[in-house]
Amino acid sequence: MSPQLVAAPSGQFTTARFDEVFAGSIATLATDRTFSWIVSVPREAYRPARYFAGELATQFLVALGLTAIAVMMRAASRSRHLQLVATIAVLAGVATYGTQVNWWGMPATFAAGMVANLVAGWLVASWWLGRRGDRNFNRGGLTTGRVTTGQV
């Protein structure tokens, strides 16, 4: 037997034994009929608000980067920029959460909800940054034209 393999006779794998074996780990549990992927953390470490805030911050930072690319394409309209960001968000969501559906057996409704969250977060950040960019442009913060040296 492998040192990482824990055998538990049927009926003897109690809650206390489960916590002893799996607490604070990522593991698998196999029975005669099932295979489970387990991510186990102490109950007091589970903080949904913190997870959501971290996810939102990550999405916002990625959206700022994508929006910076869109700002470089000033010739396109704001709606076109938002369409581009939404498209990229959908593709990123499918690439990220599609694997969880495929490999980890997560429900498709979970993945669809996460993709919707991703698209919404990226669109809000893109819209907000686009509005700030327009204000700076109108105040002369961004200029276009030919640069001259003062010599004729």
Image: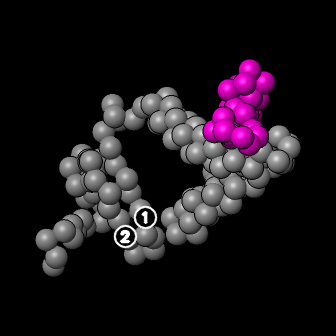
Where does label 1 land, which residue? Answer: 36
Q: Is residue 30 visible?
A: yes
Q: Secondary structure at mark 1?
A: strand
Q: Position of residue 106 (x, y in %)?
A: 57, 59
Reply above or below: 44 against 18: above
> Which numbered disc covers residue 79?
none
Q: Is residue 141 magenta?
A: yes
Between residue 47 and residue 21, name the one nearer to us: 47
Neighbor class of circle 2 (other Cα within 10 Å; few <14, some 14-19, many 20+) is few
The type of residue carrying mark 1 is Ser
| Residue drawn at x 68%, y 60% as measured from the top left | 91
Give the CA separation, mark 1 to mark 2.
6 Å
Q: Disc 1 or 2, which lies upstream in sequence?
A: 2
Task: Check disc 1: other Cα within 10 Å, few if <14, some if 14-19, many if 20+.
Answer: few
Per the rendered image, the range of residues in magenta is 125-152
Give the position of the N terminus as an image quadrant.
Answer: bottom left
Residue position for label 2: 30
